[in-house]
Amino acid sequence: MSTALPPRPRQASQSQAQICIVASNYNQEFTDALVENATNELKEIVPHAKITVARVPGAFEIPVASAALLAQPNKPTVLITLGLIIRGKTQHGDLVAESVTNSLQALACETKIPVIHEVLLVDDEKQAYARCIGSQLNRGREAARSAHTMLELFSDLGLHQGNKKKSTRSYPSNA
């Protein structure tokens, strides 16, 4: 797990992106902080984006709400998912986290629309505070920066919906 927030992009995106945040209400103190941090960061690094927020009851509902949004004719350019699961004494939290992770990955691959996954599984409120409210390892800001990176990549590759431009940029393999 990373221990520091990745650096802010040097240049703000000029994208007219539609960014949708799907966030759970459960553990609201922490999820509200994730939404606020992600939204504030997006306003700085993707200032021309239209940002919408859809709230769902808990983490388990995030994939179905995300699928419904990505099935709309006016799809978001990128989807950010935010939630918090605090492990308890049973395996329920782990099962929910695994289900959400697998569903979101499948959804991203099926739709070819970036889905930024910041549905966090933590051991306790101290970890939740550090990742959701704290300034050093804030996953809301990290989600926004990941969304920016994917917007720029998909734009460079000519992959945004309605974008017929073919990329002339080449990407060397790491092999």
Image (tube, rainbow, N blue to C red):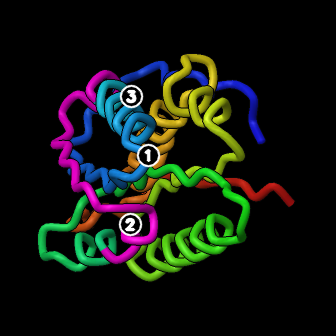
| Spatial separation of the CA atoms under disc 2 and disc 3 | 19 Å
Tell me the crowding category of disc 1: few under 14, some 14 to 19, or many 20 or more residues within 10 angstroms, Cα based: some
What is the residue that sits farthest to the right in this orientation?
A: 175
Left or right, 51 with reference to 131: left
Q: Which residue is mark 2?
A: 62
> What's under tag 3, amino acid-wise?
Asn
Instruction: Please give the residue where the numbered disc 1 appears in the rendered image.
Output: 27
- Residue 61 within the magenta-colored segment of the rendering: yes
Whichever of labels 1 and 2 marks the residue nearer the N terminus, that label is 1
Is 2 above or below relative to 67? above
| Mark 1–mark 2 CB contact (< 8 Å) | no
- Secondary element under disc 3, as helix, strand or loop, is helix
In the image, the segment drawn in magenta is: 43-64
Residue located 59% across and 22% down the image = 7
Image point 22% across, 55% down: which residue? 54
Q: Position of residue 51 (x, y in %)?
A: 20, 43
Does the residue at mark 3 contact the one at mark 1 (Cβ under 8 Å)? no
Q: Give the number of marks.
A: 3
Residue designated by label 3: 37
Q: Quadrant of residue 32?
A: top left
Question: In which quadrant will I find the C terminus?
Answer: bottom right
Residue in the foreground of this view, choosing between 22 and 169 = 22
Between disc 1 and disc 2, the foreground one is: 1
Q: Are marks 2 and 3 in contact (CB under 8 Å)?
A: no
Distance CA(mark 3)–CA(mark 1):
16 Å
What amino acid is at disc 1? Asn
Disc nearer the start of the sequence (3/1): 1
